[in-house]
Amino acid sequence: MGVQVNLPSLDFLNGIRKSNRQFAVIGLGRFGRGVCQTLHTLGYEVLGTDIDEKRVAQITADRIVSHAFELDSTDPAALRQAGIFEFETVIVAIGNYLQESIITTLNLKEAGVANVVAKASTEIHGKLLCRVGADRVVYPEFEAGCVLARSLTKPSILDRFELDPDHSIVEVVIPQEFHGRTIAELELRNRYGLNLLAVSCDKKFEINPSPHLRLQKDCLMVVIGCNKDINRLPIQ
């Protein structure tokens, strides 16, 4: 049976044009600030807004946004005046204020914003955001908790991308048991149900490596497969 990627997420990602170079972020707390800083570092233009004057002043002083405004995002007129409705993608990062988050998301979708990403603090909050039209809902606290738990129980798994609740792509430290053996000898697909995508040593990735490549402990490998099969790998 093939791996099924989350189709709603694919639809959302396909809806974001590669030419889109501008994003708006509403809510400049830790999550919103992190989004702004990363987008700015990647070379995108970012408009940040918050109802808190101090947050707006701080992010402006730190120069991690192109523009920043103090405004009440529950007021459609304020959003229109700031030009928020002209953005193709807007991130609503007001996760701890349920009413403001939902009204803001509704305002954006009613105004025709194509892609709205909204932060949710609870499952009910997330369902309500979906009801008012959010194109993608994220749960950063929950996701961070999952990452922490995995890192504590499986420290050899350095990174993970979840394709759906049952399948992932993971970057793992090559275990001692695999040291000196070729990819062909390991028979990862037959023994573990996993496919090897890449091997990395000295920060250089070899994509689709040769089956004759001998693996070295403390190097890295990237595999794709069922989470249950990934957990069967001989790693800590």
Image: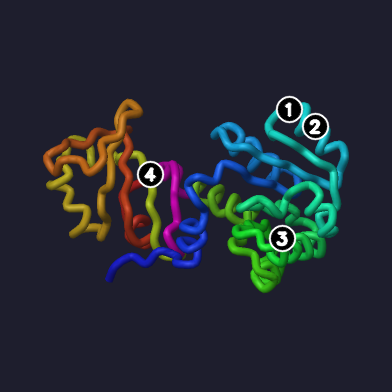
Q: Nearer the viewer, mark 1 or mark 3?
A: 3
Q: Find numbered disc 2 in the image and state the secondary structure of the residue it sits on.
A: helix
Residue name at image x 12 percent, y 40 percent: 212
Q: Earlier in the sequence, mark 2 or mark 4?
A: 2
Q: How is the image coloured?
A: rainbow
Residue name at image x 48 percent, y 63 percent: 11
Distance in Å between CA atoms under marks 2 and 3: 25 Å
| Disc 2 to disc 4: CB gap under 8 Å | no
Which residue in the structure is indicated by mark 2?
A: 58
Which residue in the structure is indicated by mark 4?
A: 171
- Give, as a three-letter code, the residue at label 1: Asp
Q: Find numbered disc 4 in the image and state the secondary structure of the residue it sits on.
A: strand
Image mark for residue 62: 1
Q: Position of residue 10 (x, y in %)?
A: 45, 61
Distance in Å between CA atoms under marks 2 and 4: 36 Å
Q: Position of residue 97 (x, y in %)?
A: 80, 58
For the C terminus, the quadrant is top left
The single residue placed furthest to the bottom in the displayed view is 131
- Give, as a three-letter code, the residue at label 4: Glu
Q: Nearer the viewer, mark 2 or mark 4?
A: 2
| Disc 2 to disc 1: CB gap under 8 Å | yes
Q: Earlier in the sequence, mark 1 or mark 3?
A: 1
Image mark for residue 157: none
- Give, as a three-letter code, the residue at label 3: Leu
Image mark for residue 108: 3
Circle 4 residues within 10 Å: few <14, some 14–19, many ≥20: many
Range of residues picked out in magenta: 153-164
Circle 3 residues within 10 Å: few <14, some 14–19, many ≥20: many
